[in-house]
Amino acid sequence: MASRKKTGRRHPLASAALLIIGLVAAGGASAAVGTVANAGPSSSSYAQQLTAADGEQLFRANCATCHGMNAQGTPNGVSLIGVGAASVDFQVMTGRMPMAMQGPQALKREPMFTQEQSDAMAAYIASLAPGPEIPSDEMLDTAGVDAEGLANGAELFRINCAMCHNVAGAGGALTEGKFAPPLKNIDAAHIYEAMLTGPQNMPVFNDANIDPEQKREIIAYLQYLDDNPSVGGFDLGSLGPVSEGLFIWIFGLGGIVAITVWLTSKPN
Amino acid sequence: MSAEGHAPTEQREVAVYDRGAAVVQSDAFENPGLPPHRPRQTDLHPEKERRAARQVVLWFLLSMLGSVLAIVAYIAVPIEPGDMGTVRFNNLFLGLGIALALLGIGFGGMHWARQLMSSHEVVEERHLSRGSEKSRARAVEIFQLGDQESGFSRRSLIRNTLIAAVALVPLPAVVLFRDLAPAQDAVEAISNTMWKAGTRLALDPSGTPIRADDVTIGSAFHVIPEDLTELGHGEGYLDQKALAAVLLVRVPLDRLNEQPARAGWSYDGIVAYSKICTHVGCPVALYEQQTHHLLCPCHQSTFDVTNHAKVIFGPAKRPLPQLPITVDDEGYLIAQSDFTEPIGPSYFERLGNIDPEHIPLTAAELETRA
């Protein structure tokens, strides 16, 4: 205790600690800047009921640059005639539209519009041509799904969804920078709308393929995954052998190496 | 080193114990010996020794605590029937308790040995593995006595029947394990699927037949033969599903680039392909509805649905087999025939099982390559 050597040498963990502090500071700063940059007009709220005419105004101001003045599409954006209100609600209220930048696919973020503004734009798009409608609350009510329905939803999820979205809904990679997003804690309406409209590269699952009752069961299964912890402890992102293998190679094998070094070293 | 070993060493010759184990005794290097003994901190400072002793005791106390904790955790955090989430904490605390109990003994023992037990360096010469002449002679004697008393060499009929009996013992296992394989000929079993002319395409898993006008543009349907649902799980349901699984999509007609010879295999832009990868048989079902690419999740083989599922990336060598489809008079999609080639990865007899009416995409497809 008293005879501690004073060589002026740094503690062996000092550089690692410095690196971690630097990374945390840089990450925190980046997140803070991103939050500020993404804050948009979503804070402004409209008290009165908006109509399809208001939706047209909002569309012209925010969407027409890419989708055309009459939603007929341009080289930068697809035609929105016939995509339906469900598509507008999904794309706008998950923040995917308006797109922050052109890229392999639009990313989920904080929505730029309020639900009323989005509904007004949805009403405008729906007035152009018939298309899938926003699901009603009773279509999304999963309270009545029993254990059998839950198991059925899980089977449908494994057959139709799990190959891209992962069996635990953790998401997965596609080609050329595209990916299937994770499905944790997603609004039931957005899950329903995604199945119905097939946003971006996701296939469409129309009511002939997966009927509304089955869609409800799939949503119930995803909510079950949200509400129930992984039975096996830390799921490490539910990515299977990739994250589990990485963990055991780094921490399991690393721990064994560290203990071996300690065992064979000469005590001071 | 044994006594016999020393004499040749002094004469600086090679000591030969037996062939293949010559030991050259004359060595150009001198044995540097052990480094000087350095006393440990615990040898020099009695208070450090006492502290190390306390630490060892602490480890053993922690181990006791761990054992008790494991028992307490097992009782206090029970697994509730029907609530899978409770397995998690039961296992976690039980495991932590047992780990602490075992690691406490291990770390305590090592700490004791490193800090408190004698630290004098000791040299232990490795002794030779060969026994002494006396014990070797005795061993041979025992064997000969055993042979004499049992008559193992003399009673050759008993000996040979014993050897034959021992040799036959593993045979039932061979027969049993062979019977684990399917009774059907393996090549026969994987060369054909349940699809035949007129089989309706049905939804997986419900078996609802699919109408052509249900398949809207951008849809992806996971399809099984309608009569598959009549099979029970004990009757090869999964085996047949693994062979017959099909992905059905509708491609806009202006994007579909069909070969004239295969133009009759699709219906109004609706195409059906085997879901089993031609590389090693993973289910290829990651369908991108705008690029019309099908991606295999295992090794990233990518197939272009607009071009008869030809391989555009990855290790797969052959396009996915196409199921020729059409509609019946009620508007339901039906198969025109089975796949015209075996589905899935290559095997030795694959080329011999390709149908005469198979229309290859390119000449290269018929080449003998895996």
Image (cartoon, coloured by chain):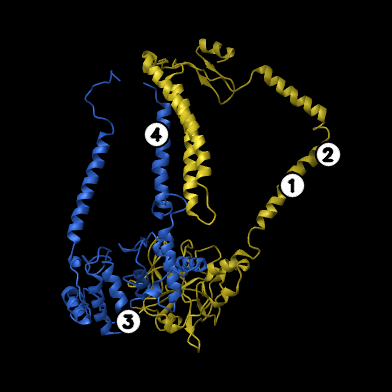
Chain colours: A blue, B yellow
The mark found on residue B157 in the picture is 2
Residue type, label 1: Leu
Q: Which mark is residue A230?
A: none
- Return the residue at label 3: A131
Q: Mark 3 lies on which chain?
A: A
Residue at the image point whose x is 49% and y is 51% from the top: B86
Which is more N-terminal, label 4 or label 3?
3
Mark 3 element type: loop
- Residue at figure coordinates x 42%, y 40% from the top left: A253
Q: Which of the two labelled residues, at mark 2 and mark 1, occupies the earlier sequence position?
A: 2
Task: Give the number of the mark in front: 2 or 4.
Answer: 4
In front: label 3 or label 4: 3
Q: Position of residue B252 (x, y in %)?
A: 35, 80
Please tell me whether mark 3 or mark 1 is closer to you in this view: 3
C-alpha distance separating marks 3 and 2: 91 Å
Task: Report whether B315 appears left or right of A124.
Answer: right
Distance CA(mark 3)–CA(mark 4) = 62 Å
Vertical side of B144 occupied by B190: above or below: below
Label 1 element class: helix
Compared to residue A72, the image places residue A11 above or below, namely above
Tell me the crowding category of disc 4: few under 14, some 14 to 19, or many 20 or more residues within 10 angstroms, Cα based: few
Q: Mark 2 lies on which chain?
A: B
Of badges 2 and 1, nearer the viewer stands: 1
Q: Name the residue under label 1.
A: B168
Whether residue B227 is situated above or below residue A41 in the rendered picture: below
Chain hosting mark 1: B
Q: Position of residue B1 (x, y in %)?
A: 55, 15
Residue farthest along the left direction in this orientation: A61
Separation (CA) of disc 4 from disc 1: 50 Å
Q: Among all residues in the image, which is located at the extreme front?
A: A47
Compared across the picture, whether B261 is left or right of B138 comes to left
Nearest to the eye among marks 3 and 2: give it. Answer: 3
